[in-house]
Amino acid sequence: MAVLAPVTGSAAPVPRKKRLGRVLSERRTRFGLLNAAPVVVYLLILFVYPIFSTLMLSLKGENGGFTLHWYADAFRGANLEILLTTLRISAETSLLALVVGFALASAISRLKPLWAGLAMLVVVVPHFISALVRTYGWIILLGDNGVVNNLLTVLHFPGAPFQLLYNEIGVVIGTTAVMLPYTVLLLYAVMKGIDRRLLAAAAGMGAGRITIFRRVYVPLVAPGLVNAGVLSFILCLGYYLTPALMGGEKQTMVASLIDEQVMKQNQWNGASALGIILLLLTFAGLLLLRLLKSAGEAVRKRGAAS
């Protein structure tokens, strides 16, 4: 009787084109592509095409040829100072929003659900009021004869009244008030998910409050801090209204410069270059966020492995 030898060779791999054709021939795939088509068209028309058009306009010279003049112009002289001012104010705003937002979110996370919901309502509802109304409200509060200066004068605070408007202090206060709801929401979501038994366990092992805060609490809320800080920084980069109304000439930001070049100078090419630079800065912030998340996950994995 003949004995059949076992087949030792593996099946031939299916070519990539055949696998792709097989996937596309499935009914579920065709249905998914059909549903995704309107969204893709929407993104192409309203996002990709305008960005591509802005990029091409920023690379177009006055004679119609290719040039990098507008980008070089954005990184020298007064334009460079405005760009650095924008980065500085955005960093100051994100830092102040983190400090205030951390304190608020930490306090709210310790409240009972009913009171926590009411507190979050107080934090979030002002965000739905017109930004123009909120900005004028801050102008009334921080003016030379505003509520803040009058209160400090009545209390005989040294140096009162202070110049709180039309300088960097006023701009940072106004932009921080705008970014604060985002910061509080992100931090509150992270803090609410922390298992308080971890803090109690650290206290039971003899750790003091400062040690618990530094070694246990802060590492647990670190992802929320990173997300909130980067989000506030990115949003503040392109903010226009508050710096324009509450700042002075030295607090001009890139958004105001773009408005001036378009509305007053009719210089669309330079404004397009500045817009692309802001877009690249936004992408850089998102890339930094991703790198920080990857680094944090790597640290946690090493800690778990050890």
Image (cartoon, grey):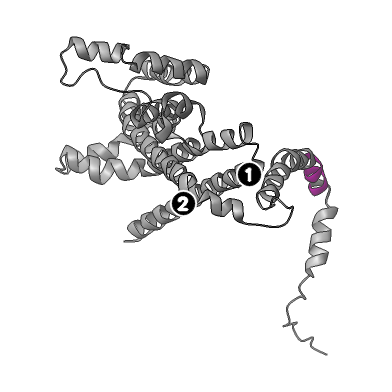
Q: Earlier in the sequence, mark 1 or mark 2?
A: 1
Quadrant in which the N terminus appears: bottom right
Amino acid identity at mark 1: Ser
Q: CA distance from mark 1 to mark 2?
A: 24 Å
- Name the spot of residue 116 as percent of width and height, x first: 38, 20
Frontmost residue, 44 versus 168:
168
Q: Tell me the residue that label 1 is attached to.
A: 272
Pair 1/2: label in front: 1
Q: Quadrant of residue 194?
A: top left
- Name the spot of residue 68 as percent of width and height, x first: 62, 56
Q: Which span is picked out in magenta? A: 29-35
> 199 left or right of 36?
left
- Magenta stretch, main secondary structure, is helix
Q: Tell me the residue that label 2 is attached to.
A: 288
Q: Residue at x 60, y 47 (%)?
A: 273
Residue 269 against residue 116 in the figure, above or below: below
Frontmost residue, 157 versus 291:
157
Residue at disc 1, secondary structure: helix
Q: Residue at x 79, y 86 (%)?
A: 4
> 303 left or right of 280?
left
Query: In the image, is residue 199 part of the stretch drawn in magenta?
Result: no
- Name the spot of residue 174 as percent of width and height, x first: 40, 25
| CA neighbours of label 1 inside 10 A, class few (<14), some (14 to 19), many (20+) | many
Residue at disc 2, secondary structure: helix
Q: Residue at x 73, y 56 (%)?
A: 65
> 278 left or right of 108?
right
- Name the spot of residue 93 as percent of width and height, x first: 38, 35
Amino acid identity at mark 2: Leu
Quadrant in which the C terminus appears: bottom left
| CA neighbours of label 2 inside 10 A, class few (<14), some (14 to 19), many (20+) | some
